[in-house]
Amino acid sequence: MKRILSGIKPTGAPHLGNYFGMMKPCIALQEQGEAFYFIADYHALTTVRDPEAMREHTRGVALDFLACGLDPVKAVIFRQSDVPEHTELAWILSCFTPMPMLENCHAFKDHLAKQKTPVHGLFAYPVLMAADILLYDSNVVPVGRDQKQHVEVTRDIAGAINRTYPKAGHSPGGDGLFVIPEPSIIPHVATVVGLDGQKMSKSYDNTIPIFDAEKPMRKKIMGIVTDSSPVEAPKDPSVSTIVALYRLFAGEADVEKMEADFRAGGVGYGDFKKRLFDALWEYFRPMREKRAALAADPTHVDGVLASGAARAHAVASATMERVRRAVGLR
Ligand code: AMP
């Protein structure tokens, strides 16, 4: 059975980009293999400096994931730092990782281009991500287009180590020390746009958290940036943030109706935003109800994370033992 692995950083409340780009496809994949989904608090530590926020967001992301349909019996959901083997393996991999390969990675290059000084953790994060993947002998890594480069880095590092230790114990079902993973670019999911029309991202402060309360969510939707076309003017649906977001929730007929109303003129952006809000609010209604039920028992999430950590640790510790023996640390 194939192993599937993906992670999400606890840097804030999960938003529509996280949901459509990662959570929804990962929930669908829990039916198709042995899925390991982790809350990437070690990765978040490159930016999060508030320990309470880190703890709160970690539990919040887990709660949101469960509310959206993640089944903790089928999939393993865990906190990355509950399995410290992630950092141990990252060090070993970093001893095989050429610096130029990391200098070429886009998150690091973006930082330099913006004249920011990256911390070492940001420079090295593709190596930690390689450890996340290799620790679980993952075959499939569902990622957005932006993460494909990092899976390629993982494949390069794993290939180099497999060639260095050809006689090492093999991964179960693999033909080398590490299983070489396949990036699986999540199909049909374009980058979800934020309130200002850029990529929806916590770092741009343009997100719509999926479980926002009604009032702030309505306020955010009404604040979507538009041009200043008057009500009567025909409008172009192909460049509209409202239509781009509406497509995520509405049925085909409703999307066609909105597009036709855009072209015809006579309807203002305020009305389109109301339609968008109603569709969004209805879409998440059952998940919101489930979330409220789960949150009623404050120990539930901690229990799920504890049992996920135990299941993840069983796999990770076996891999680590194999790796330590192969490289001579035992
Ligand atoms: P992060 O919060 O950076 O850990 O992202 C978690 C997952 O959400 C990753 O797989 C991202 O590719 C995905 N993601 C984040 N923002 C967006 C977006 N605006 N559109 C689509 N996917 C996204």
Image (cartoon, rainbow, N blue to C red):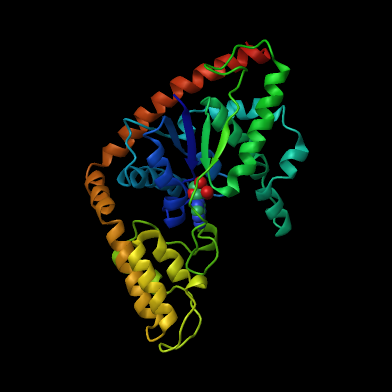
Image-quadrant location for residue 151:
top right
257 or 298: which is nearer to us?
257
Depicted 33 relative to depicted 264: above or below:
above
Residue 237 rendering spot, x and y as whole percentages: 47, 73
Instruction: Locate the N terminus and report the quarter of the image it occupies.
Output: top left
Query: Does the image show residue 241?
Result: yes
Query: Does the image show residue 219?
Result: no
218 or 227: which is nearer to us?
227
121 or 144: which is nearer to us?
144
147 horizontally vs 222: left or right: right
Residue 315 rendering spot, x and y as whole percentages: 47, 21
115 or 266: which is nearer to us?
266
Depicted 32 relative to depicted 26: above or below:
above
Say how many tags the image has: 0
Residue at (74% x, 44% y) in the render: 103
115 horizontally vs 213: left or right: right
Residue 171 rendering spot, x and y as whole percentages: 56, 17
Residue 138 rendering spot, x and y as whole percentages: 52, 28
Residue at (60% x, 27% y) in the render: 180
Residue at (58% x, 24% y) in the render: 179
Residue at (41% x, 87% y) in the render: 231
Instruction: Locate the C terminus and report the quarter of the image it occupies.
Output: top right
